Amino acid sequence: MKRFLAIGAAVVAAALIIGAAVAIARPDWLPARIRTGLAPGPAPAESAGEDAGLFCQEHGVPEKFCTLCHEELKEKLQACREHGGLPEDICTLCHPEVKDKYRLRVCKEHGLPESYCSRCGKAPSASLDPPDDGWCVAHKKPEDLCVACKVDPTAHGPADESKACRKPLPLVRLASAKLAGQIGIQVARATEESHAHKLTANAEAAYDANRYADITPRVGGFLREVRADLGKVVEQGEVLAVVDSAEVSTAKAQYITARAAEELARATYDRTRPLAREGVLARKGEIETLTALNQAKASLLDASQRLKNFGFDDRRLGRILKDNDTSSFLDVISPLDGTVVVRHAVRGEPVQATAQVFSVTDTSVMWLWVDVYESDIAAVKVGQQVSFVVSGNDETSFRGTVNWIGTEVNPQTRTTRIRAELANPEGRLRANQFGQAEIRVGEEHKAVVVPKAAVQRKDDVDVVFLPEPEGDVYRPQRVVTKPTDRGDVLEVAWGLRPGQKIVTKGAFLLKTEIMKGAIGAGCCE
């Protein structure tokens, strides 16, 4: 009997020893009611603040905030996205008073609860996500602006990590703070300035078609005179050349004849009508003279219209009748004020009625054809300001406004043509010159701006790097940028506040670290 009692006592003692060892080595195997208890140290005074309840000895925080033991709390507690995603209630950097209030065990190096300090790598895998920059990865836009996520509430935060909407980028840690200076990393603050959004696109100058005219002689013949040359500034109605054409002579003679016939027919009718009314002449005679008058009028109208088609106005038609002018000369005149830009006229050569002998245009106003990508066309509106710089001559720009937006997209280039009207008072802009057009698609406004070198591109998203207080850690922040009226800076429309520190030089080296997927495995090691 004593032997059995001794064996039982030995078994109980061994079990107690094993249990104690397990409790010391793996406290997370113990039930929560055994693992937790009152926080170590003296009991706080009644005026010390809110009672934190049970204390998680394993993770050094109140049990009601321990998302490592109770993952369901992640959905109830607000996370501090700025400092590693730990619960906001125990973020000692945002709320220093909670360290003493809840008697938290903090990381001596960074001042965060040690079980949640993602900066020194002590946070277990069950902790909240790394610092969240508020970016919707699934739809490549800020979460608060993501229409797709708002339509589908389940679009972000699902259990399947591969479908997660929010995937913060990893922190970049250098081997030491001194290394930042050695590799040339420089930091500056984001500033707020007045800027306007501009869109840049390829463009080509052209003559204003509303101020351009191709001039033809309108009749076949020979060029008797050429009075204008290339570059000559002419006025509307000015004679550019004279054509010698038998067709003109014939038309003038027909007009004079038709006019005389019409006058005779009218006089005959005027004499016949009263006699027919009085019964002296038969009614038939009145009708015949009236018919002859109408035919004469039609012939005169046809003859006069033919001369008008040649460019004769009523004043010149009157002179033809007055002078009985049957000359074969026809003046080729300018229909508008402008400059002669094309000349094919040579004295004595034969010309056809439709042959182009001159072109005249007003070069004080030019058109600009701009090819805008379909992704940018929605921002372009009629009336927006445009500036144009000719390739190879950056010192001179021409300004104007958008006056037409195309209605189709080129299937090859995926661009839409828009037209702008540019002032060219000195005539320095020439047709068919190629260059870059800037369209001001937004009014001047206050904007957060950063140097272009500070913005890096990763996965088709712009990223900047924010230095952390430790000096050797940099947090990537995805941003939305827009072009400005200055070529060396970008506007940050989302993701930064004025005064925030960012890496302005060396950002590319930091980008290589997050692209490698392993901090310290590349050039910053």
Image: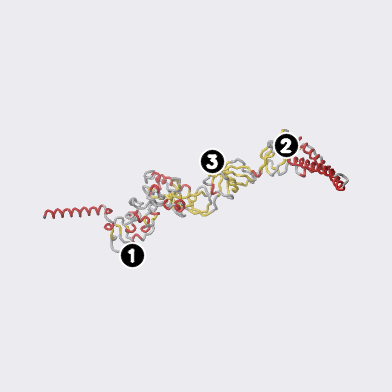
Query: Which residue, as the protein is rendered here, is positioned at the far right?
Result: 280
Pointer 2: residues within 10 angstroms few (<14), some, or many (20+)? many
Q: Residue at x 44, y 45 (%)?
A: 459
Relative vertical location of residue 518 with respect to residue 108 in this rendering, above or below: above
Q: Which residue is mark 2?
A: 219
Residue 429 shows up from this direction? yes
Answer with mark 1 or mark 3, whichever residue precedes in sequence: 1
Pointer 3: residues within 10 angstroms few (<14), some, or many (20+)? few
Quarter of the picture holding the N terminus = bottom left
Q: Which mark is residue 48?
A: 1
Amino acid of disc 2: Val
Amino acid of disc 1: Ala
Residue 107 shows up from this direction? no
Work out how far the residue at label 3 is from the one at label 2, CA to CA, in angstroms: 43 Å
User: x, y (%) of residue 394?
Assistant: 56, 44
Amino acid of disc 3: Pro
User: x, y (%) of residue 272?
Assistant: 86, 45
Q: Which residue is mark 3?
A: 411
Answer with mark 1 or mark 2, whichever residue precedes in sequence: 1
Q: Which one is in front, 491 or 324? A: 324
Q: On the picture, is 239 further left or further right than 51?
A: right
Which is in the foreground here, disc 1 or disc 2?
Answer: 2
Quarter of the picture holding the C terminus = top left
Answer with mark 3 or mark 2, whichever residue precedes in sequence: 2
Quarter residue 215 falls in: top right
Q: On the picture, is 166 further left or further right than 31?
A: right
Give the SS element for disc 3.
loop
Relative vertical location of residue 306 with respect to residue 88 in this rendering, above or below: above
Work out how far the residue at label 1 is from the one at label 3, CA to CA, in angstroms: 72 Å
Work out how far the residue at label 1 is from the one at label 2, CA to CA, in angstroms: 108 Å
Give the SS element for disc 1.
helix
